[in-house]
Image (spheres, rainbow, N blue to C red):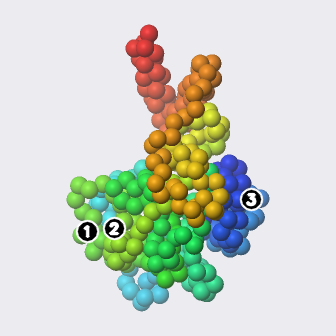
């Protein structure tokens, strides 16, 4: 589990039941934390392995430290990896520069490397056949696919949310390929000029696109396969921590759903996959999740849900940066919609 343990108060029960217990898995955390991190949370308490680095405002400092460590390892002079800020996109968000990118996307390559460094340094790789690389804010509506139906020689990701790249939120990979799948940061820090040559131009780079390109470079892209989306990314109602995607409040579950399509897909597949046996029978192969319709609800319930969505959208807009202008724009849009309907 990478980067953080955010949303654990929502997600831990389903992670324990549908992932850890279902797969009989050991939990490893590779996180960036600060002095206020709450070690009483259930993910930390349940973890067999806990590897952490210091979180900081400028993640470039973490990249510099990683480069120093790698250059000592390979006896290399450190190249200027910051030339990669000349590329278009948000994949280096969280690193200070003259033209900073939004988001904190750069935390993921670093935490993948942090995980790999400890797996290799503590001789843990040989203890396990398969590795599930995931995030803490997934709510699982179905059991994780049993590893027996996931071909060992393939790299498995959820079906969807690829954004012209490859879904980077969850991955199942064998011991043979886990190092290559985790080690994005070496090309960034040791071969930046080569990487810049491939990435320059108008193309907008996201974490998904960077992961797909990395697997091409490692000759692994053809091994990627997908399984149905049976989980979705959630955010608690009162979570004010910074995030690239705030999501929308969903009254039927009582919290924010960060990516609506994830939620729809997971809810649809939850209607046909309830157990390991359902996975093994493979009835879901011919299932079309777009055919599942939401059950009808009363007018009063729809009205209450609509009011709740507007309320929490207002709260969300208020807590975003430049909240006053965002709030005014949001209120103006809502008023225009109401006037148009009347």
Residue drawn at point x = 41 percent, y = 69 percent: 224
Q: Quadrant of the N terminus?
A: bottom right
Would residue 241 appear left or right of 244 to someone viewing this image? right
Could you say which is closer to the camera, residue 22 or residue 116? 22
Could you say which is closer to the camera, residue 154 or residue 283? 283
Q: Which mark is residue 213?
A: 2
Q: Nearer the viewer, mark 1 or mark 3?
A: 3
Tell me which numbered mark, 2 or 3, is placed earlier along the sequence.
3
Residue drawn at point x = 43 percent, y = 53 percent: 161
Residue at far bottom of view: 75
Dot 2, how many residues are within 10 Å of its Cα: few (below 14), some (14-19), or many (20+)? many
Residue 303: image x %, image y %?
59, 20
Examine the rendered structure and indicate whether residue 64 appears above or below residue 13: below
Examine the rendered structure and indicate whether residue 285 appears above or below residue 297: below
Tell me which numbered mark, 1 or 3, is placed earlier along the sequence.
3
Q: Which mark is residue 42?
A: 3
Q: Quadrant of residue 37?
A: bottom right
Q: Secondary structure at mark 2?
A: helix
Find out whether the residues at labels 2 and 1 contact each other: C-beta distance under 8 Å: yes
Q: Secondary structure at mark 1?
A: helix
Dot 3, how many residues are within 10 Å of its Cα: few (below 14), some (14-19), or many (20+)? some
Q: Which mark is residue 198?
A: 1
Residue 322: image x %, image y %?
47, 35
Q: Is residue 139 visible?
A: no
């Amino acid at each position: 589990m990478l980067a953080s343990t955010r949303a654990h108060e929502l997600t831990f029960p389903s992670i324990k039941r549908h992932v850890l217990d279902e797969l009989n898995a050991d939990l490893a955390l590779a996180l960036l934390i600060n002095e206020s991190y709450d070690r009483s949370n259930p993910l930390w308490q349940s973890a067999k392995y806990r590897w952490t680095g210091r979180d900081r405002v400028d993640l470039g400092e973490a990249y510099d430290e990683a480069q120093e460590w790698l250059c000592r390892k390979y006896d290399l002079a450190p190249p200027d990896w910051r030339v990669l800020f000349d590329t278009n996109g948000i994949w280096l968000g969280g690193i200070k520069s003259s033209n900073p990118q939004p988001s904190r996307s750069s935390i993921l390559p670093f935490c993948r490397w942090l995980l790999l460094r400890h797996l290799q340094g503590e001789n843990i790789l040989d203890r396990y056949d398969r590795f599930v690389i995931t995030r803490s804010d997934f709510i699982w509506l179905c059991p994780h696919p049993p590893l027996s139906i996931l071909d060992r020689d393939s790299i498995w990701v959820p079906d969807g949310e690829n954004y012209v790249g490859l879904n980077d939120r969850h991955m199942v990979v064998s011991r043979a390929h886990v190092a290559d799948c985790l080690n994005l940061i070496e090309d960034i820090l040791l071969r930046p000029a080569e990487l810049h040559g491939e990435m320059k131009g108008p193309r907008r780079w996201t974490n998904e696109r960077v992961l797909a390109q990395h697997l091409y470079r490692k000759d692994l892209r053809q091994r990627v396969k997908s399984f149905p989306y049976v989980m979705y990314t959630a955010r608690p109602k009162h979570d004010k921590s910074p995030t690239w995607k705030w999501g929308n409040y969903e009254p039927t579950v009582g919290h924010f759903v960060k990516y609506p399509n994830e939620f729809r897909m997971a809810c649809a597949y939850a209607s046909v996959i309830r157990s390991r046996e359902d996975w093994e029978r493979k009835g879901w192969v011919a299932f079309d999740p777009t055919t599942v319709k939401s059950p009808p609800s009363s007018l009063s319930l729809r009205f209450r849900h609509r009011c709740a969505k507007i309320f929490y959208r207002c709260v969300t807009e208020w807590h975003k940066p430049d909240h006053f202008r965002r709030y005014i724009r949001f209120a103006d849009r809502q008023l225009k919609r109401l006037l148009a309907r009347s």
